[in-house]
């Protein structure tokens, strides 16, 4: 079933292509991009062997990774004036 100017089977081909792209992305993500570093890429401290074995491809020590994970990302506020919820009250 095609809609508009699309030929028959175009929708299924698009879905299959999207699934194939996602599977490829997941395969690449599961493999480490590079071998684990012995020293942290940010502070230069030694990364313990246990961490290097547990997290393949690790580049940061525990402290630097904790700082990076805890850093907040500034986001814009929510515009309540334009939302349907604010108009229904």
Image (cartoon, grey):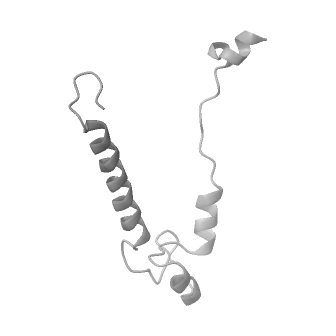
Residue drawn at x 64%, y 20% is 79
70 or 29, which is in the foreground? 29
Q: Residue 13: x percent and y percent?
A: 27, 44
35 or 42, which is in the foreground? 35
31 or 59, which is in the foreground? 31
Residue drawn at x 22%, y 23% is 5
Above or below, 18 relative to 68: above
- Asked if residue 46 can be seen in this view, the reply is no
Q: In this view, does 60 lie to the left or right of 88?
A: left
Farthest bottom residue? 49
- Asked if residue 66 can be seen in this view, the reply is yes
74 or 5, which is in the foreground? 5
Residue drawn at x 66%, y 13% is 81
Above or below, 78 relative to 48: above
Residue drawn at x 39%, y 80% is 35
Quarter of the image where one finds residue 21 = bottom left
Q: Residue 56: x percent and y percent?
A: 47, 79
Q: Residue 4: x percent and y percent?
A: 27, 21
Number of marks drawn: 0
Above or below, 77 relative to 42: above
- Quadrant (top left/top right/bottom left/bottom right) for the N terminus: top left
Farthest right residue? 89
Quarter of the image where one finds residue 6 = top left
Q: Residue 89: x percent and y percent?
A: 79, 11
């Amino acid at each position: 079933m095609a809609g508009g100017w699309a030929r028959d089977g175009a929708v299924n081909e698009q879905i299959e292509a999207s699934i194939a792209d996602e599977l490829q992305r997941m395969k690449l993500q599961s493999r480490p991009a590079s071998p684990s570093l012995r020293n942290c890429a940010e502070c230069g401290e030694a990364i313990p062997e246990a961490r290097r074995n547990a997290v393949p491809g690790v580049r940061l020590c525990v402290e630097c990774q904790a700082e990076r994970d805890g850093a907040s990302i500034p986001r814009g506020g929510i515009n309540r004036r334009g939302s349907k919820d604010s108009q229904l009250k």
